[in-house]
Amino acid sequence: MRLTRYTDLALRAVMRLAVMDGQELLTTKRIADGMNVPYTHMTKAIAHLQHLGVIEARRGRNGGLALTPAGRETRVGELVRNLEGDGEVVPCEGEEPCPLAGACRLRRALREAQEAFYASLDHLTIEDLVASPTGPVLLSLGSRG
Ligand code: SF4
């Protein structure tokens, strides 16, 4: 199973904000620069994460982005499911539909494997992802951007 780059960079943004613990708010540019992601790609991911209620923008002179309390407790599998959408591992009904699509045991097995993959990630929260050794590395990115 392979995640889209979009999902990966959204997860990078979430981890970057999780380690700040809301004490310092970050701009999209600072997150993008620190995580080595193009700004325009990060902008789309941030908007999606706001829509999902995982992060929020706080206004004011020192405004910026922060993880919401619910975002901090979000299960990683749940978030990945939301970011990846309903796509299957194999595009059985794409532009050139497979003739087995309606009665394929492999398709069913792949669906179950996909669900098992997400379920295994549900054992982790976003908070868990920024424990050591990841958290200290993320904090060291704070001076960039
Ligand atoms: S063989 Fe099965 S899993 Fe593969 S594309 Fe066809 S329906 Fe999908």
Image (spheres, grey):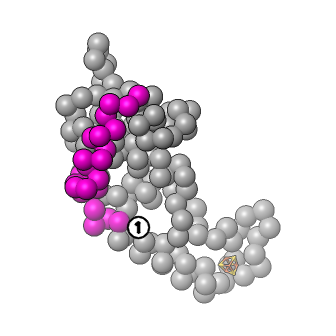
**Point 34% across, 38% down: residue:** 141
Mark 1 lies on residue: 118
Looking at the rendering, in which quadrant would you find the C terminus?
top left
The answer to whether residue 138 shows anywhere in this view is: yes
Looking at the image, residue 55 sits to the left or right of residue 109; the answer is left
| Vertical placement of residue 117 versus 100, above or below | above
Amino acid type for the residue under numbered disc 1: Tyr
Magenta: main secondary structure equals: helix
Q: Quadrant of residue 109?
A: bottom right
Q: Residue at x 64, y 71 (%)?
A: 90
The image shows residue 56, relative to residue 120, as above or below, that is: above
Image position, residue 21 (x, y; %): 21, 39
Q: Quadrant of residue 18?
A: top left
Is 117 colored magenta in this rendering? no
Quarter holding residue 63: top left
Name, please, the residue furthest toward the right. 96
Instruction: State the image coordinates of residue 85 (x, y, percent, origin top left).
Output: 52, 56
Picture mark count = 1
Question: Is residue 45 among the parts visible in the rendering?
Answer: no
Q: Position of residue 53 (x, y in %)?
A: 35, 40
In the image, 65 versus 39, the foreground residue is 39
Which residue sits at x=38%, y=31%?
144
The residue closer to the viewer here, 19 or 110, is: 19
What residue range appears in magenta? 121-145
